[in-house]
Image: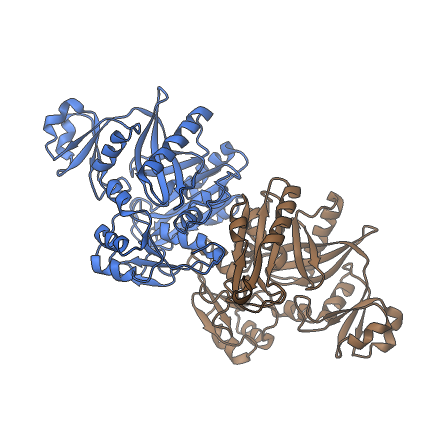
Chain colours: A blue, B brown
Amino acid sequence: MGVNDMNNPRVKVLGGGQLGRMLIQESSRYNQSISVLDPSPNAPAAHLAQPFVQGDFNDYETVLNFCQDADVVTIEIEHVNIEALKALEQQGKKVFPQTSVLEIIKDKGLQKQFYLDHHIPTSPFILCDGNLEEHVDFFPCMQKSRTGGYDGKGVYPIKSKEDLNNAFSGPCVLEKWVAFEKEIAVIVARNEQGQISVFPSVEMEFNEEANLVAFLFSPAQISKELEQRAESIAMDVAEKLGIVGLLAVEMFVTSNGEILVNEVAPRPHNSGHHTIECCYTSQYEQHLRAILNWPLGSTHLIQPAVMINLLGEKGCKGRAHYLGMEYALNIPGVYVHLYGKEQTSPFRKMGHITVLNESLERAKSIAQSLTERVKVVSVDNSN
Amino acid sequence: MGVNDMNNPRVKVLGGGQLGRMLIQESSRYNQSISVLDPSPNAPAAHLAQPFVQGDFNDYETVLNFCQDADVVTIEIEHVNIEALKALEQQGKKVFPQTSVLEIIKDKGLQKQFYLDHHIPTSPFILCDGNLEEHVDFFPCMQKSRTGGYDGKGVYPIKSKEDLNNAFSGPCVLEKWVAFEKEIAVIVARNEQGQISVFPSVEMEFNEEANLVAFLFSPAQISKELEQRAESIAMDVAEKLGIVGLLAVEMFVTSNGEILVNEVAPRPHNSGHHTIECCYTSQYEQHLRAILNWPLGSTHLIQPAVMINLLGEKGCKGRAHYLGMEYALNIPGVYVHLYGKEQTSPFRKMGHITVLNESLERAKSIAQSLTERVKVVSVDNSN
C-alpha cells in the first residue's frame, strides 16, 4: 500500500455520519474510494460512499462481513462492535485506531485511569458503581456515564446533594469540578511508522443548553507557552496510547495556568471541521494519511477561522429548511457545509459554517452575525 | 430554486471528465447532487455523479431524455448536441451557458467575428474555406479548425509556405501570428440576474510539444494597469455574450502592452483548477452559484499558487502508476488531484497539482521540483 501506487487501497469505515461524509469528501481528490457501514440508508455519508453498505456496526457478524476485503478498517464513531474489530486484528487486518486504544477511550473510567497511570495531567476522579451518596465530600463534580455518552449525553453536573435526584444511575465516573478559564482542543495525528503531527490549538465556546460547541476559534487565544504545553500534552497522550490515526484531545485551561486533559476522541472531531479550509491539510485528509501510512501533511494555519455548528432550531422537528443562506453566501470567506440530513430536530447537528478571515476578530463578528441569521427550521415552521 | 431552500435543484451536466468531477466535488458540501451524462462508464465523474447516466452527449434523443427532469442543464465540454439543448430551451428549461453563446464559441470563426463586431481586441484573422495558398500574404499565422478542436488539437502554426504540406484541410480560421510576451487568462462568472465577478488573472506557460499548459501562475506577474485592463476586457466579453455561468478568457499580452483575446471557453477551465485551494470560492463552486442564480462568491486570493498538469509520460500507455507521490505529499501546501483515469497515454491529463505558498517564487521552485519527480507512467514502464 505504497503512496506511489495510489492504487486505491480498500478503506472501510464503521459509521456514516457527517465525520464519515467529510472523510470521503476530503479523500476524493486522491481518487480514494471509501466504503461505509451504517444502519441508516439516509446517513450523511451514504450517497458518497463507494460502496455504501446498510447494516449495524454494533453487530459482530455484520462488521466482520463488511470488513472481510478491507485493506484498512477505521471508524467515525466509537460505539461499534469491538469484538469484531479484535477478530479482524487477529486475522492480521489493519484496524486504526487499534482496539486496544478504543477499549480505553470508550470507557471514561478506564480513560481517566490511563491518564493517572501515565502521568497525564487530568482532574481528580472517582470510579463509582452508582452509589453517589457516599461521595458527597467530592461534590461539586461532573457525573459521566462510563460508556455510551456523546455530544453532551451521559453527562450531568452535580453541584450539591440537591442535584442527586436528577443524577443517573449505573457505573459512572465522578470528575472533580474544574473552574476552567478556557476549553481548548488539539488534534494529533500519528501514522504507523510513528510520525506525529499536531494541528494548531483551538478554543471552544459551548452552547450550555445543548452542551455542544457553539463557537470554535482557531487559533486559541492563549499564550505561546500554554500553546506549546497543550501541544506537547496532546502528543504525549497519542504516543502513550500508541494510536494510529487521529486523536482529538480536549483540555481545560485553569485560572492558574494549569492544563488538564478532559477527554479524547480517537477519530476526526467536531473541533477540527475548520481545518478543511484553514489548514494546508484537513483533519480528514490527515486521518487518511495516518491510517494509510502516508507522510503526514502540513498543519500550517493559512488564515484564522471561526467555526459554528448549524444546530436544528429549538421547537422545530421535520423536513429541514435553511434560513439566511443568501446572507451567508454573500460574505467573503464563509464556507457552508450541509450534512444532507433531511430531517431536523432540536440541537441536531445539521451542518457547520467556517469563517476565514485575516483577522480572527473580524471572523468572530461575522460568525456572530451568522448565528443570528442562519437557522435550520422545519418546513412547517419556516414562515 | 431559492438559495434558502438548498432543496437540491436537479442539476444535469453533459460530460463527465475531470471538470465535471471537480464540479461535483466542489458542490458536495452544499449537499448538491449532480447528474452526469457521458459515454464512458469509467469517466472521471462517473462514480461521483448522482446519478451517472451512460450515453452519448452528441445524440439528440439521449440528451433530451437525460435532461427531461432537470432544473438546470449545464456542460463541461462544448462538443455536445446543441439542437437538443435548443429544444430544451424552447421547453422553458434553464440551459447555462445558453445555446446562443455555445453556437458562437463552438465555431472559432464565429467567435473571432463576434470579437470584431463587438470591438473586443483580438488579432486579425481570415475565415478560409480550405484554400490556404491564396493567403500567403497573411503568413505567419495560426491555422485553427473552426469546430472540434481542443487541448491543442485542430491547431497548426503556418510560418511560411513550406508548412502548407502539413496543414489540415477543411474550413478554418487563420489568425495572424501574435508575438506575445505572456499568455494570461481571466475567468469571469455571471449569474442570471447579471451579477458579475472575475478571478485574479493567471499566467500560463505551455508545454510546446503537447500544446498544453505546463505551469500556471496565480496571480499573473503583470502590472496593476494591465491586470485591470485584462479583467475589464474579460467582463466585457461575458456581458456582450450575455453568458450565464463561467467564461474563461485566454489573452495574449504583447510586447507593446496590448491585450488581445485569444479564445474563450464557456465552462470551468484548466486555468482555474488552482482556485479550489487558493481563492475563497473555487471556479467550480462559482459556476454552480452562477447557474443556480445564487450570489456569486468572493474570488479573493488567499495565497499565491502554481498549478501543474499531471500529464501521461511520453512513451507510456496502459494502467497508470504514479511516481514521486511520497515526495509531493511531504511538501507543505502541495495538493495532489488525481482524476481517477485508470489508463494513461502520452500527454493525457491524468491529474494536476496545486502548490500554495506565501511567496509565488517559492511556489514556482517547488512546482519545478515536482515536475522533475512526479510522473505518470504505465505499470509496465514503472521500473
Quadrant of the rendered image containing residue B114: bottom right
Looking at the image, residue A159 sits to the left or right of residue B85; the answer is: left
Task: Answer above or below: position of A162 versus B283.
Answer: above
Task: Answer above or below: position of A350 versus B9.
Answer: above
Q: Residue at x 61, y 63 (%)?
A: B313
Task: Answer above or below: position of A227 versus B205.
Answer: above
Q: Residue at x 82, y 58 (%)?
A: B179
Task: Answer above or below: position of B187 versus A263.
Answer: below
Looking at the image, residue A21 sits to the left or right of residue B107; the answer is: left
Q: Looking at the picture, how far across and down is residue B323, in whole percent?
A: 54, 57
Q: Residue at x 44, y 61 (%)?
A: B33
The extreme right residue here reads B137
Q: Nearer the viewer, residue B272 or A84?
A: A84
Q: Looking at the picture, how far across and down is residue B34, in whole percent?
A: 46, 63
Q: Nearer the viewer, residue B189 or B371?
A: B371
Q: Residue at x 53, y 59 (%)?
A: B322
Quadrant of the rendered image containing residue A246: top left
